[in-house]
């Protein structure tokens, strides 16, 4: 398991992008919502989806909207294109939501992730990490 700060500064280097987080309590959703505004940077694409094909996941004008429902074991990230459409839904299977000393939200990420595209692709990611963790006990 790894700890991921939801501003994605460590792996992605997003520490210079505007980041917002807020706890929400409504009849529809109870939990943490965050957003990263990608104000610049090169476009990054994933090219392994069968139906969607080459799919943009980062770049100037995109937003990453993340939801961590209270009491659940997942974090859902919608990678939103500049035109307002979702390119990919990325679901992290998590152990817990925590907060660092500076108030930054952190997910304790388990090994398995599931990705969905609006075109109907479903892709399971990081199975090899799960297998390696199982093999190492």
Image (cartoon, grey):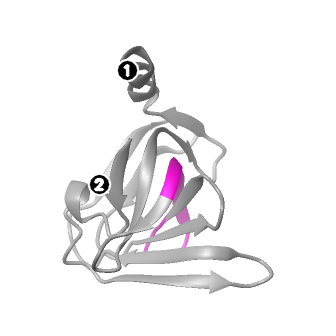
Residue 96, how many percent across, how many down?
51, 56
Question: Badge 1, how many Cα within 10 Å: few under 14, some, many 20+?
Answer: few
For the record, the magenta segment spans 79-96
Camera-side residue: 68 or 89? Answer: 68
- Indicate whether 122 appears above or below 100: above
Q: Secondary structure at mark 1?
A: helix
Residue identified by numbered label 2 = 44
Residue displayed at 51% across by 49% down: 94
Say if 123 sits above or below 107 in the image.
above
Q: Position of residue 42 (x, y in %)?
A: 21, 63
Residue 48 location, quadrant: top left
> Residue 118 placed where, x, y %?
63, 54
Q: Residue 108, can we see it? A: yes
**Relative horizontal placement of residue 79, taking residue 1 as reference (left or right):** right
Q: Which residue is mark 1?
A: 132
Q: Secondary structure at mark 2?
A: strand
Q: Principal SS element in the magenta part?
A: strand
Report the quarter where the C terminus lies.
top left
> Is residue 74 positioned above or below 29 on the image?
above
Report whether residue 83 is seen: no
Q: How many marks on residues?
A: 2
Residue 91 drawn in magenta: yes
In this view of the protein, which residue sits in the foreground, 91 or 110? 110
Q: Residue furthest right?
A: 27
Q: CA distance from mark 2 to mark 1?
A: 28 Å
Q: Quadrant of the N terminus?
A: top left
């Amino acid at each position: 398991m790894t700890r991921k700060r939801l501003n994605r500064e460590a792996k992605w280097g997003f520490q210079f992008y505007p980041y917002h987080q807020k706890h929400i309590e409504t009849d529809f959703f109870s939990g943490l919502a965050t957003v990263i505004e990608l104000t610049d940077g090169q476009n990054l694409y994933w090219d392994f989806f069968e139906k969607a094909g080459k799919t943009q996941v980062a770049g100037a004008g995109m937003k990453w909207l993340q939801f961590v429902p209270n009491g659940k074991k997942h974090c859902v990230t919608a990678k939103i294109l500049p035109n307002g459409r979702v390119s990919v839904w990325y679901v992290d299977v998590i152990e817990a939501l925590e907060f660092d000393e500076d108030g930054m939200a952190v997910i304790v990420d388990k090994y398995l992730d599931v990705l969905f595209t609006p075109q109907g692709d479903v892709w399971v990611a990081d199975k090899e990490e799960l297998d390696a963790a199982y093999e190492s006990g």
